[in-house]
Amino acid sequence: MVKIFLCFVICILVWIPKIIFAQQNKAELCFKNIPKNQIPFFYQFKIKYPVGSETLAKQINNFTKSLPEGEGYITCNFFINCNGEIIDLTISETDSNHNTTSFNSNYISEVESFLKNLKSWPIPKYNNTQFVAEYRSFLSFKILKGKVHEVIP
């Protein structure tokens, strides 16, 4: 019984300060420097951007000044860093048959600016405990009749 009590006291004295220090210094909890091919996707954490697809479509249509020419998809792959910011953004453009194409370069720049202004990326949780980790995400914009018709996922 005494051994159990001593073990309990030692655990409290050792781990509680580490937990408090880690909470005060979130950078210590940030799981970064993971090889890019091993960074998990957003769905592995069961999280997504808190604004729905219809709202995002309206927001990007209001944000952009130039119009995309043609129809197809603009797919944006990116990582969310430990501060909830988009990093390493890559954009691919395809027509409605999924063949590589190019949309108006001014429009693509505006899409990139729009994405970098999204600031509500969720922080992953594990067993209802918040921790910080980089993760991968993507948004695909379906272009029809000169505007974003749908945002996927």
Image (cartoon, rainbow, N blue to C red):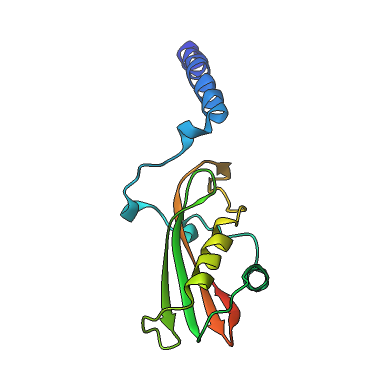
Q: Position of residue 24 (x, y in %)?
A: 57, 27
Q: Does residue 151 sit above or below 146 in this rendering?
A: above
Number of numbered tags placed on the structure image = 0
Residue nearer the viewer, 92 or 83: 92
Residue nearer the viewer, 116 or 42: 116
Q: Position of residue 134 (x, y in %)?
A: 45, 48
Residue nearer the viewer, 116 or 3: 116
Residue that appears at 46% across and 66% down: 76
Q: Position of residue 8 (x, y in %)?
A: 51, 18
Residue 153 at least partly seen: no
Residue that appears at 45% across and 13% down: 3
Q: Is residue 32 left or right of residue 53?
A: left
Q: Does residue 2 sit above or below 92 in this rendering?
A: above
Q: Does residue 121 sit above or below 114 in this rendering?
A: above
Q: Is residue 100 left or right of residue 50?
A: left
Q: Position of residue 66 (x, y in %)?
A: 59, 75
Q: Is residue 124 left or right of residue 32?
A: right
Q: Give the quadrant of residue 127.
A: top right
Residue that appears at 49% across and 61% down: 43
Residue 9 at least partly seen: yes
